[in-house]
Image (cartoon, helix red, strand yellow):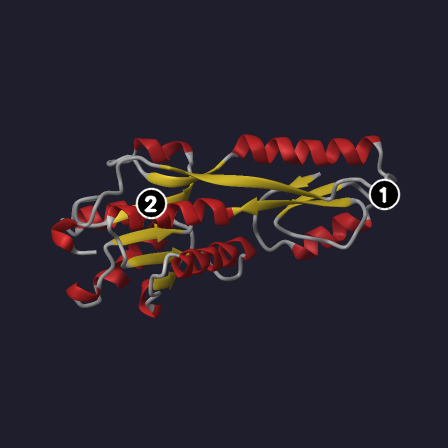
Amino acid sequence: MAVLSFGAEEPVLDQLVHRDIPMVLAEFRLDDPKVSTILLDYSTGIHEAIRHLVGLGHSKIAFLAGPHKLHSAITRENDYRAAMQQAGLTIQKKWVIECDHTLKGGVAGFAQLQAQAPQARPSAILCSNDMTAIGVLRAAYMEGLRVPDDVSVIGLDDIDFAEFTLPPLTTIRLSRADLARSAFEALRQQAEDPNNPKLEREYLVSTSLVVRGSTAAPANGRS
């Protein structure tokens, strides 16, 4: 069984482990020889995203995080913080907002940023997932703002809809094909040679930045 929901399913996982079946989990480790883990390398894509924005001239970069009950959301936020630090940029506490990975969450997060004084608002927003970013695109449009002229927006996941938004969404691609391939390979190895002490237990799936139309240099020198 492959459990790839990125949620908090510890009670369910414990029950499955006790049924003695091979499993592969996304971003969750269990101390059991029948369980493999797929790790998502968010760091590479998020660092690329921050470098991309810095290269365009941005320094005021906000982050709309996912719900802190999710390990994946915490990991993404930590990677944003590390990327900002590596770029030598200041992280404003009021620019890091916990959302819920939904369209409405993106709208609400953007509203919190807009409630700040105009001179204190970020010129770019990195979102913990694409649904949040699409919510930001909608909210910006409703505010009469233009993306990317007035604010740049980056998502994470590269869902199918991301390239069909207006403008097309710049995002961090998490390959679903690579994720599925790693899950299949982990289960195949467990089924064929479950007692092999050298059996690979962790698989890494990388991420990369896909540049589309939602990012540009900040307008009027507003970095």
Figure quadrant of residue 166: top left
Q: In what element is the residue under mark 2?
A: helix
Tell me: residue 167, above or below residue 13: above
Q: Name the residue under label 2.
A: 52
Figure quadrant of residue 100: bottom left
Graded by Cα atoms within 10 Å as few (under 14), some (14 to 19) or many (20 or more), the crowding at tag 2 reads some
**Residue 204 located left or right of residue 107:** right
Q: What residue type is labelled 2?
A: His
Measure the C-alpha gap from mark 1 to mark 2: 42 Å
Question: Going 51% across and 34% down the picture, which residue do you hit?
Answer: 175
**Residue 145 located left or right of residue 133:** left
Question: Going 69% across and 57% down the picture, which residue do you hit?
Answer: 11
| 164 or 208: nearer the viewer | 208
Question: Going 42% across and 51% down the picture, which residue do you hit?
Answer: 128
How many numbered markers are drawn? 2
First in sequence, mark 1 or 2: give its number: 2
**Residue 72 located left or right of residue 200:** left
Quadrant of the rendering where the C terminus is positioned: bottom left
| 64 or 220: nearer the viewer | 220
Q: Mark 1 points at which residue?
A: 197
Question: Going 79% across and 40% down the picture, which residue do you hit?
Answer: 199
| 38 or 198: nearer the viewer | 198
Point out residue 27 in the picture as x, y percentages from the top left corner: 61, 49
Quadrant of the rendering where the N terminus is positioned: top right
**Residue 187 located left or right of residue 8:** right
Q: What residue type is labelled 1?
A: Pro
